[in-house]
Amino acid sequence: MLADELKQLDRKQMTQLAERIREELIGAVRETGGHLASNLGAVELTLALYKVFDFPQDKLIFDVGHQSYVQKLLTGRDLSTLRRKGGASGFPDPAESEHDAFIAGHSGTSVAAGIGLCNARDLRGENYKVVSLIGDASLGNGLALEAMFSSEDKPKNFLVVLNDNGMSINKNHSALYRSISKRTVKKRYRTFNSFLSRTFKETNSFGRALRRFKYSIKGWLNQNYFFERCGFKYVGPVNGHDLGELLGVLADIKKIEEPVLLHVITKKGKGYEPAEAEPAAYHGVCRNFEKSEHSFSDALGRLMLDRAEQDASLVAVTAAMTDGVGLKEFAEKYPARLFDAGICEEYAVTMAAGMAKGGLSPVVCVYSTFLQRAYDQIVHDVCLQNLPVLFCVDRAGLVGSDGKTHQGLLELSAMRAVPNLSVFAPKDCAELADIFDFARSLRAPALIRYPNGSAEELGSVTKISHTSLWETVSDGNGPVVLASGARAVARALRAKELSGTDCKVINCRSVKPLDQRVLDSLAAKRILTFEEGYASGGFGSAVAEYYAVKGMSVHLTVVGAENVPVAHATAQEQAETLGLSAEALAARIRAIS
């Protein structure tokens, strides 16, 4: 079913289509993995928007993009290829379709981007509507709030749809959510609405005026005046699963020029009982809805529980990712020591800085792709004050099917430049515990990066210390491979076997500081650095800079990811495409032997 055919359907046919779409979503995500619960909750809403508006001439901006699968179906994309190499992205991407008005893998962007599009449209004398669909607690993100509150002068022909399902990835506990989502209004409104519906029909102009009056009363009962102070006409709450109600309200909104915020109530996981019962568990799922394996995340969770028992000052900070970063059991056992900032990484980091200033030992657990949103806070609030905040950075390196918006290839290059910050990369989960304790003992800012998925245990050789930052994991008399990170070390050991050479493999578990003693001892060797991150400004670049500053002439080859966006595929396929596989590394080793 394409978007233009949707225009010809009546309400009954659209209801039937919604059910078929749910079945297709469940079937597709069962095969490919992906975001299920959020998309099931947005079926009728997406259908209604496409029925009333004229996309892609009008612009639809998602926030965040994990509720965009219905749009993909309506615009001819094959969900059987979802998140697979060469197939449909799991997030909106303008390079994939003209219907994707703005890339959307991170939260909080839609209102600002929508205002920007409206400004461009008005200055260029063009004529189209802009719709920003925000939900899953994204409205509480700082960027969204800046866009909402920075000015009460909002552009015309601009609609913000608040998809209110009571959830972030986990349950939404923010004060903003409790303020705007007063679901008790339903009880107060129901009697009033029932009386009007029994008394009047809404099939004529008077009925349409009555409907607008009803929503004005509903908004008044809901006490959402602050949206109007932001420059929006508030409409709602509206039942986001009632196509008749949605179509009527959206048709009215389309006819007016003033900026509108439409408050829609939906249920995350709608139409699939397991997802309705456990929307957090079905937010992002693997193939066959199996639980994904993330060795480092699980290891960190166990480590945090153990160290929290020993040290009452240890606290955990996360940004709406409690389960994803391995802190579910920590939250259950130590609820007063788990601080969830919502989808607000900047707030999470500065809050952690305040905790450290007050004598606590905060551990900020965050995905690499989201850490980049808090760069200024890391620099200004944590590192300039040299505060003992430990960043445990999950999903560092290639992330596989989440694709270009979620790759963890950037943080190593970015964090190397930050003063007072030490950066570490354990080779396996056992070494994670060793480095975790060492990093905390520094009583200074530190960062530990590690990948997603299953991790191979490579065996302990030496404990990290100030005099033993790096370790030799496989000795040899040939070229030297300086590998940094779990996948890099594992692939380097495999590449040694494949290359048939007698190379030495060193686990460079401390990226900053470098092990200068080891580097000085290797100056006469042929050296190859290997990392799963951008080569530009990364670990290999740090080694090259060290030798350059000292004026030492060395034979050095730097192997890392090319500085380009990396599309969705498996992590192994991405590594092969970038020349970061064990086989590609073996060829590099042979070339310098």
Image (spheres, helix red, strand yellow):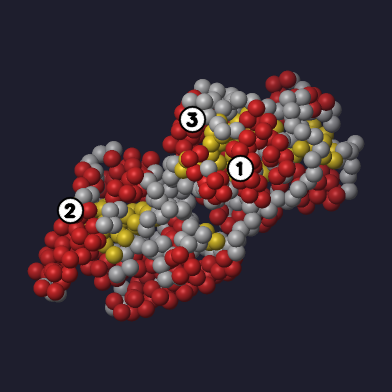
Secondary structure beneath label 2: helix
Specify the quadrant of the image occupied by residue 43.
bottom left
Numbered label attached to residue 569: none
* Foreground pick, 200 / 404: 200
Numbered label attached to residue 355: 3
- Residue at the spot of label 2: 220
Secondary structure beneath label 3: helix
User: Cα distance, mark 3 to mark 1?
Assistant: 19 Å
Amino acid carrying label 3: it is Met
**What residue do we see at 69% from left, 40% from top?**
432
Using a 10 Å C-alpha cutoff, classify the residue at mark 1 as few (fewer than 14 neighbours), some (14 to 19) or many (20 or more). Answer: some
The answer to whether the residues at label 1 and label 2 have Cβ atoms under 8 Å apart is: no
- Residue at the spot of label 1: 305
Task: Judge left or right: residue 375 versus residue 252.
Answer: right
Relative image position of residue 243 (x, y in whole percent): 29, 70
Say if 94 sits above or below 541 in the image: below
**What residue do we see at 56% from left, 33% from top?**
312
Amino acid carrying label 2: it is Trp
Relative image position of residue 553 (x, y in whole percent): 78, 25
Q: Quadrant of the N terminus?
A: bottom left
Secondary structure beneath label 1: helix
